[in-house]
Image (cartoon, coloured by chain):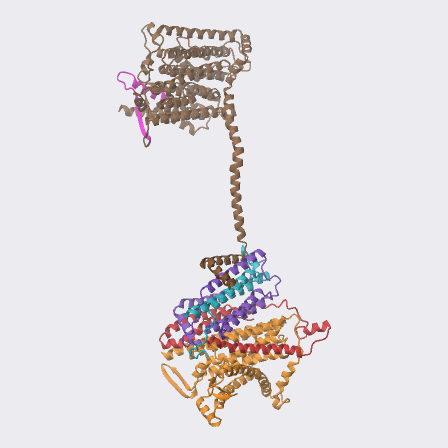
């Protein structure tokens, strides 16, 4: 069994969860009582998004500040830098055994330095401040 | 055609990938495009796994599916996107040319690939655990591609600074 | 069960070509997406799609040729893709701030 | 999946068992939470339905099944429905990849007039070589359910809540993955089995070029990575939106955050997702830092011999696996109790404090931790 | 030592007028005519004296044949050696004395004449410049220097004719003179080229030494004949012969002293002087000589007839000059180069005299030039009348005045010379008759008869001393000038047998036509008698016509009718020129412009412009700013590249085969 088969249980489990979810979601739909009242007003009110009783305001002007989008970008960049650390981390122990530990340390030192500089700049540039 | 487990897996994942790719370009609501792209990413990660490139599959999941697409979805929400009335660019003739050029690219690449004989994957030699393959990758990364590795670090730094600067631009060129 | 010794089983009929053809399909779909769509974000997504197609080809060849260079390249392609997405979306936001709508046509205003 | 029918069926059954474990965890935990919070607040928890109120949740489950179904008016229907399902996937998939106990060896036995050969079943959903990276990947998918719920319910406040929750999840995922780097450096491998295997026996570590053995301490990861453990543990709180970090759901106008519009079983699914995430977090913590299913000072062979004596045959190896599994469950329960305990003691963070903590303190500390471990390991082995 | 002294003298001779020009030129605005006049006259005087000093060297035994002066090497390119060097031999000695002598007198006369002008200094500057150029022309040792002088005098004649350029007509006259001269100069240049090609050098001495041995050419296209003809064309331009004489009558628009100096004495004779210096060359081209003779005779007769009907005093004199030049060319044509030089000198004297006379008349009559409004001026201007009277007798050729000797010599040679013929003599004879008639008419209408002007209003007065002196000197010269070249026939019968000094003087330098002369001494006497009698006869008839019976003139004029109008309008030559040459060229070019230029050249440029714009616009559409269009081009590029990489044909074929082949 080439090890690509190892994926099968993952897919089976995922399928299982999906099936279970779908059954329940539509199950409650079927089982539960229907909102049979024809009166459009009650339909409207009942389906209105829950605003602690306040009349629902339009979705249109939901303005999400740039901060979130900025965090997402920084997340990607730092995430990739962390991902680059993984192979290094794995290799580090072996490289110490075969004597190239210092070299690996140096290389990662530079990389981490860049990471830190990036982080410091972000902090200094108040990109991460949530007011 | 003896369909071994592996083949089923490949065709399933390939099917999902192609369908979701189609979804990406055909959906009129950009959010759905993003989600179908996420599905593509996951299926591609699966394909990597089927090629026993475990670490890269994991990275694909984390970086692409987990980070880039989250950014896409978040930006789309930022833009309060609605279903686009005209999703495709105007111009029938240019449209025709575009389709033709894409088809040609596929025809040539596909043709070349199919023509190059039936390259079978040789069986894996010896025990290849994900950790071991990652170690080989690390070896390669820090010996042969050291410079590009550091360059990547630098690039990410600059992008971080650039993105922040870009998002802070107040007036555009046509600050009307 | 990857750790078990090499288990001889029927050599899977799926070869390098299948992966390459898949990669070609995804790439062409990406090209169509870039050319046809009007929304900048969707164009960026199609570009990501094309990059993924390239990644598949890389990994397929790396598996076929039994050396890890392909996977290293995939790494770098991913970084570039992430960087590109970040900058692309930064541009898209500036366009959105200016024109309240994200449409590739607005880049024409930068024609100058 | 397996050579013959029996093995395949067993494996598939395993998937079901693991998923049910996760689903069943919710009522137990909810009950525990209610009783726990009552105990902390010096009041009685639910005790009407069944002994000590244990059946309370069963009743709730049935109630949820029959609640009325309704959808917010302009909601994006597909996303509204798919979000709860998506919430469950990360928890299930990552929990299945964890080694829960020692593998069970079954000698050949007679059943249905056919001899079934020897099997060894791994007491684990599936063993992917890249355990850690897989778990991180899957957990990063969790953000989608938040965003989809927020956008699907087309409720301005739920959207705000979803975006805030995802931003928070993202920020702490950074700290999480950095703290894992520490583990990678120490153990030098991705797969959980190897990590757990490495944590047997007394604490032995190399420092200043010599090998030191402290016999009375088990060889757990926490002693190698104390700071890493703390960072990991607090990061998981944020990932699961647990109390100190559950701002998006609790703020005044955000009401219940991204799942405001949900009711009935869909809400329950979100809880399954949340508690699943908590279970995975504590299981990971146990695996990395608390020696997984290893009972300190006790070797699997002894336990097997003991059960051989008592029961004998295949049942013995099954029972040994169960004992080790119970030891793991004990640690997970302990950690879960801490989760609940923290919920009712720590006050909630303001959002900017939360994000500052994530970016400006946890991330640097994680980085510091990585550097220290690297230097420590390097000096140790020089 | 002698030569260095010669260089010094030559330098003074030539540079004096130049310095005069520079002095006056720098202060050309000033109105002080007295100062300007004295400077100019002094410069002319100095050059005359130094010329005299050099010429004195030539006299006496053992005196050198020629005095040369070398200054510097002007052009030395691949075979063409043009040294700036000057020579005075027997021919140029005569010429230089005439030019500087008469020039000085005319400068003196101008002081009086130009006293009322606004730009006297500029006038005198031009006069000095003219003198300088004339000296270059005469003394130049090679054709190039002569050509420089040739052009210089042309320029100065233009400047001086158009001196009062504010008057459009005078400016046009100047332009006409210049253009016609230039046409002649073109011929001159071609002649120089021919000479250079055949002889490889332009120096007079070299050419003459190379020509010495050659035989005469018979055909028309021989190099020497062609050179001779071209040079003759140059001469006709400068000396106003048949085709190119039209500018001289109009040149009268300039101030009268200018006409006297340039258009009577010096410049116009340059052509004759050039032919005489190159006589050994012309001798070898009998056909060319024949042409020169015919043109000379024709010009003489035609100009004389036109002179009969002119009413402007200066126009009459101008046509008389053209006619006399015709005689000189007739002489050269028949090979009597000595006679030509003799007539040139004598003509210079009496023509300058008459022009100055007319100048003082015009001055007196307050710029009135129409002789019909004059008459009976003898009383008012006795000295002018007297000097004019001497000039009149000289020109009609009554012995013993200068005119008689030189003209008769020409007529005789026209008859007797090997190249001559009876027809040539007859033409000359008729010309002489007309000359006598119109000169007497002129005298009658201006000086004799009743005054035809309002005496109360205009008071003609005698000219001042500065104008009187030149008149007297020239009158004496006109009277005495003839004795320079007394023909042998007369020489024998006169006591002391004076020989023909001029012939002796020019002997070595001019060529004598080979072949026998037909006609004995007796014939010479007969011809001489004929010409004197016809001159006297026509003078008396003219006197009778215009003084006694003016009415008769009207009757004769009416009877002549058409012939009179023809002659009066100068044979419509100007009109013909305009009709045949100038207008066709102008209209032709206009038509050419209208058709070719507008249709083809303009159209071509417009088309080119539009083409570029067209291409530009198509290129512009490529940069529409539409990013997806750019992306499309990229895709197409990729397709092309891939096709190239995988030789499209093979892969597509296989694909299709797979798809359909099954």
| Residue E457 sits inside the magenta stretch | no
Q: Which chain is the one coloured purple?
A: B
- Extreme residue in the bottom direction: D310
* Magenta-drawn stretch contains E74: yes
Name the residue nearer the viewer: E401 or E244. E244
In the image, the chain rendered in brown is E
Which quadrant holds residue D212? bottom left
Q: How many marks?
A: 0
Q: Is residue A85 visible?
A: yes
Chain drawn orange, letter? D
Near-viewer residue (E17 or D85):
D85
| Residue lying at the far front of the rendered structure | E661
Identity of the residue drawn at 29% across and 24% down: E5
E66 sits to left or right of E473: left
Give me the chain that's cyan.
Answer: C
Give, as a single range, the part of the protein colored magenta.
E46-75
Residue E69 vs residue D264: left or right?
A: left
**Residue E552 sits in quarter:** top right
The image quadrant where one finds the C terminus of chain D is: bottom left
Above or below, comparing residue A18 to residue E133 in the picture: below
User: Residue E169: horizontal and vertical position, in percent?
Assistant: 51, 24
Q: Which chain is red?
A: A
Between D66 and D39, the one nearer to me in the picture:
D66
């Amino acid at each position: 069994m080439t090890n690509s088969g190892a994926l099968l249980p993952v897919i089976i489990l995922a399928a299982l969860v999906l099936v279970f979810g779908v059954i329940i979601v539509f199950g409650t739909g079927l089982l539960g009582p229907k909102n049979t009242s024809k009166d459009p007003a009650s339909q409207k009110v009942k389906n209105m998004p829950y605003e602690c009783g306040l009349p629902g305001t339009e979705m249109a002007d939901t303005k999400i500040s740039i901060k979130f989008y900025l965090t997402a970008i920084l997340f990607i960049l730092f995430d990739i830098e962390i991902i680059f650390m993984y192979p290094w981390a794995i290799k580090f122990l072996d490289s110490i055994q075969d004597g190239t530990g210092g070299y690996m340390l140096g290389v990662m030192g530079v990389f981490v330095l860049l990471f830190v500089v990036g982080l410091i700049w972000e902090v200094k540039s108040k990109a991460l401040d949530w007011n | 055609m003896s369909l071994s487990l592996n083949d089923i897996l490949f065709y399933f994942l390939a099917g999902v990938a192609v369908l979701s790719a189609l979804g990406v370009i055909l959906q009129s609501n950009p959010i759905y495009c993003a989600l179908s792209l996420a599905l593509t990413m996951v299926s591609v990660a699966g394909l990597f796994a089927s090629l026993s490139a475990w670490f890269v599959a994991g990275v694909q999941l984390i970086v692409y599916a987990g980070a880039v697409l989250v950014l896409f979805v978040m930006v789309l929400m930022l833009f309060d996107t609605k279903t686009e009335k005209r999703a495709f660019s105007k111009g029938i003739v240019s449209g025709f040319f575009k389709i033709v050029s894409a088809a040609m690219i596929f025809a040539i690449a596909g043709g070349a690939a199919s023509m190059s004989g039936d390259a079978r994957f040789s069986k894996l030699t010896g025990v290849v655990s994900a950790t071991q393959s990652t170690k080989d990758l690390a070896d390669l990364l820090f010996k042969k591609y050291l410079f590009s590795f550091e360059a990547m670090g630098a690039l990410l730094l600059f992008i971080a600074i650039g993105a922040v600067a870009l998002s802070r631009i107040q007036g555009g060129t046509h600050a009307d | 069960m990857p750790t078990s010794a090499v288990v001889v089983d029927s050599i899977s009929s799926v070869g390098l070509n299948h992966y390459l053809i898949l990669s070609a399909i995804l790439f062409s779909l990406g090209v169509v997406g870039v050319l046809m769509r009007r929304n900048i974000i969707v164009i960026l997504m199609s570009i990501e799609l094309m990059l993924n197609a390239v990644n598949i080809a890389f990994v397929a060849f790396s598996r076929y040729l039994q050396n890890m260079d392909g996977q290293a390249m995939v790494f770098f392609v991913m970084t570039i893709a992430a960087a590109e997405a970040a900058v692309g979306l930064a541009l898209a936001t500036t366009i959105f701030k200016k024109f309240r709508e994200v449409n590739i046509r607005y880049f024409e205003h930068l024609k100058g | 999946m397996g050579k013959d029918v029996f093995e395949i069926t067993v494996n598939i059954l395993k998937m079901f068992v693991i998923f049910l474990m996760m689903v069943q965890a919710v009522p137990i935990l909810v009950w525990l939470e209610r009783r726990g919070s009552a105990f902390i607040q010096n009041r009685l928890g639910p005790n009407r339905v069944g002994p000590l109120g244990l059946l309370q949740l069963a009743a709730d489950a049935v109630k949820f099944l029959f609640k009325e179904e309704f959808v917010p008016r302009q909601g994006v229907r597909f996303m509204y429905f798919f979000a709860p399902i998506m919430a469950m996937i990360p928890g299930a998939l990552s929990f299945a990849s964890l080694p829960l106990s020692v593998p069970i060896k079954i000698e050949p036995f007679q059943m249905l007039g056919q001899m079934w050969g020897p099997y060894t079943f791994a007491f684990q959903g599936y063993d992917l070589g890249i355990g850690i990276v897989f778990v991180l990947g899957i957990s990063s998918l969790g953000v989608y359910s938040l965003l989809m719920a927020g956008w699907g319910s087309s409720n301005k406040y739920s959207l705000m809540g979803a975006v805030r929750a995802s931003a928070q999840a993202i920020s702490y995922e950074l700290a999480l993955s950095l703290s894992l780097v520490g583990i990678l450096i120490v153990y030098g491998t991705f797969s959980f089995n190897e990590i757990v295997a490495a944590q047997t026996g007394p604490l032995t570590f190399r420092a200043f070029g010599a090998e030191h053995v402290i016999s009375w301490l088990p060889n757990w990861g926490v002693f190698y990575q104390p700071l890493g453990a703390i960072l990991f543990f607090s990061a998981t709180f944020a990932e699961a939106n647990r109390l100190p970090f559950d701002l998006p759901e609790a703020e005044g106008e955000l009401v219940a955050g991204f799942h405001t519009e949900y009711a009935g079983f869909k809400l329950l699914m979100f809880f399954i997702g949340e508690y699943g995430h908590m279970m995975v977090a504590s299981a990971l913590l146990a695996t990395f830092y608390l020696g997984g299913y290893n009972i300190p000072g006790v070797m699997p062979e002894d336990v097997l011999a003991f059960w051989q004596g008592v029961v004998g045959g295949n049942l013995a190896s099954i029972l040994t696996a169960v004992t080790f599994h119970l030891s793991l469950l004990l640690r997970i329960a302990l950690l879960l109790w801490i989760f609940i305990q923290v919920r009712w003691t720590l006050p909630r963070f303001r959002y900017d404090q939360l994000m500052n903590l994530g970016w400006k303190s946890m991330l640097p500390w994680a980085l510091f931790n990585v550097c220290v471990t690297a230097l420590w390991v390097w000096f140790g082995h020089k | 030592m002698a030569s260095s002294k010669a260089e010094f003298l030559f330098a003074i001779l030539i540079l004096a007028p130049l310095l005069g020009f520079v002095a006056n030129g720098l202060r050309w605005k000033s109105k002080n005519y007295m100062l300007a006049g004295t400077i100019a006259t002094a410069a002319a005087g100095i050059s005359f004296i130094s010329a005299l000093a050099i010429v004195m060297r030539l006299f006496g035994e053992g005196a050198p044949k020629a005095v040369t002066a070398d200054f510097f090497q002007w052009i030395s390119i691949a075979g063409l050696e043009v040294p700036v060097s000057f020579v005075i031999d027997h021919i140029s000695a005569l010429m230089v004395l005439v030019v500087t002598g008469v020039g000085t007198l005319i400068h003196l006369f101008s002081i009086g004449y130009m006293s009322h002008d606004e730009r006297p200094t500029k006038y005198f500057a031009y006069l000095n410049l003219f003198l300088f150029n004339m000296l270059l022309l005469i003394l130049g040792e090679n054709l190039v220097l002569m050509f420089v002088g040739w052009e210089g005098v042309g320029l100065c004649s233009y400047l001086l004719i158009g001196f009062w350029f504010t008057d459009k007509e005078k400016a046009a006259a100047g332009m006409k003179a210049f253009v016609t001269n230039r046409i002649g100069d073109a011929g001159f240049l071609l002649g120089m080229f021919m000479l250079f090609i055949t002889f490889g050098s332009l120096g007079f001495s070299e050419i003459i030494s190379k020509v010495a041995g050659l035989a005469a050419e018979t055909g028309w296209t021989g190099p020497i004949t062609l050179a001779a003809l071209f040079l003759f064309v140059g001469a006709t331009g400068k000396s106003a012969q048949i085709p190119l004489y039209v500018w001289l009558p109009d040149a009268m628009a300039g101030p009268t002293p200018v006409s006297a100096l340039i258009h009577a004495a010096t410049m116009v004779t340059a052509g004759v002087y050039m032919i005489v210096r190159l006589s050994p060359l012309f001798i070898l081209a009998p056909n060319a000589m024949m042409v020169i003779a015919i043109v000379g005779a024709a010009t003489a007769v035609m100009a004389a007839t036109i002179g009969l009907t002119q009413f402007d005093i200066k126009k009459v004199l101008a046509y008389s000059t053209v006619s006399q030049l015709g005689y000189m060319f007739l002489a050269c044509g028949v090979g009597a180069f000595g006679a030509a030089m003799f007539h040139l000198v004598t003509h210079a004297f009496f023509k300058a005299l008459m022009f100055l006379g007319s100048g003082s008349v015009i001055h007196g009559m307050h710029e009135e030039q129409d002789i019909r409004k004059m008459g009976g001026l003898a009383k008012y201007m006795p000295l002018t009348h007297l000097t004019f009277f001497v000039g009149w007798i000289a020109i009609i050729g009554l012995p013993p005045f200068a005119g008689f000797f030189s003209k008769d010599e020409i007529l005789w040679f026209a008859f007797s010379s090997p190249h001559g013929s009876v027809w040539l003599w007859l033409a000359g004879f008729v010309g002489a008759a007309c000359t006598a008639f119109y000169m007497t008419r002129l005298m009658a209408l201006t000086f004799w008869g009743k005054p035809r002007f309002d005496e109360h209003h205009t008071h003609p007065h005698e000219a001042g001393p500065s104008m009187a002196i030149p008149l007297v000197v020239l009158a004496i010269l006109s009277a005495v000038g003839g004795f320079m070249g007394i023909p042998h026939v007369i020489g024998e019968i006169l006591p002391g047998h004076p020989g023909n000094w001029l012939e002796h003087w020019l002997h070595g330098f001019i060529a004598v036509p080979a072949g026998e002369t037909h006609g004995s001494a007796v014939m010479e006497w007969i011809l001489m008698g004929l010409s004197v009698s016809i001159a006297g006869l026509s003078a008396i008839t003219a006197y009778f016509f215009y003084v006694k019976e003016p009415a008769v003139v009207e009757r004769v004029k009416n009877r002549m009718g058409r012939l009179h109008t023809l002659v009066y309008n100068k044979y419509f030559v100007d009109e013909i020129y305009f009709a045949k040459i100038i207008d066709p060229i102008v209209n032709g070019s206009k038509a050419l412009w209208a058709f070719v230029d507008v249709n083809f050249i303009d159209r071509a440029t417009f088309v080119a412009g539009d083409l570029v714009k067209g291409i530009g616009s198509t290129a512009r559409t490529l940069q529409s700013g539409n990013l997806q269009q750019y992306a499309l081009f990229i895709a197409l590029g990729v397709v092309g590249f891939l096709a190239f990489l995988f030789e499209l044909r093979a892969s597509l074929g296989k694909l299709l085969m797979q798809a359909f082949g099954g």
